[in-house]
Amino acid sequence: MSERSELAQRIVAFCGENDLDQPYGGDFQQDSKRRGKPYIVLFCRPGNLDGVVMVYGEKFLQVKYSTRYQELPHQDNRVFESEEHLLDFLKKAFVDFDCEAALAIPTKHKLEE
């Protein structure tokens, strides 16, 4: 298994442990049609959250999500430079609902849609 696929697997495990894998989340696959062939991890909570983590490398982890949680932007797209920051963001934003702390986590840059 490659380092990127192991990283994607750890993100899948995190989603499962934190109930972010319902009903279709918690799986990953490689997108061979996209530049960089990222691994894609889905996360979801029915009616409230749909998201994807695109694993391009250990220092480029892109998160896109759409949510109904009031304190977060309805749609957002962020790039994290480490697994630690990514998992910290997911936990604070969607598990602990500490949105202020989640949005304060450093990102590489914010991508515009």
Image (spheres, rainbow, N blue to C red):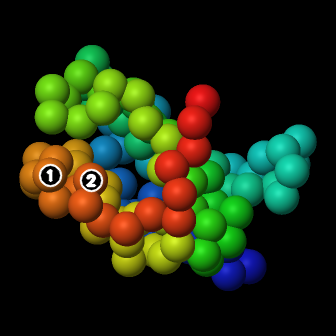
Describe the element under mark 2 as helix, strand or loop. Answer: helix
Q: CA distance from mark 1 to mark 2?
A: 5 Å
Where is residue 58? Give x, y as percent: 61, 77
- Which residue is disc 2 drawn over? 103
Where is residue 67? Give x, y as percent: 31, 27
Q: Residue at x 63, y 61 (%)?
A: 55
Q: Nearer the viewer, residue 62 or 45?
A: 62
Three-letter residue code for mark 2: Leu
Q: Is residue 91 left or right of residue 1?
A: left
Depicted 24 relative to depicted 35: above or below: above
Residue 14, quarter of the rendered image: bottom left
Q: Is residue 86 at least partly visible in the picture?
A: yes
Residue 89, quarter of the rendered image: bottom left
Q: Nearer the viewer, residue 75 or 5?
A: 75
Three-letter residue code for mark 1: Glu
Q: Residue at x 38, y 77 (%)?
A: 84
- Which residue is disc 1 drawn over? 100
Rendered-image quadrant of the N terminus: bottom right
Q: Is residue 94 left or right of residue 55?
A: left
Describe the element under mark 1 as helix, strand or loop. Answer: helix
Q: Is residue 50 left or right of residue 67?
A: right
Rendered-image quadrant of the C terminus: top right
Q: Is residue 82 left or right of residue 59?
A: left
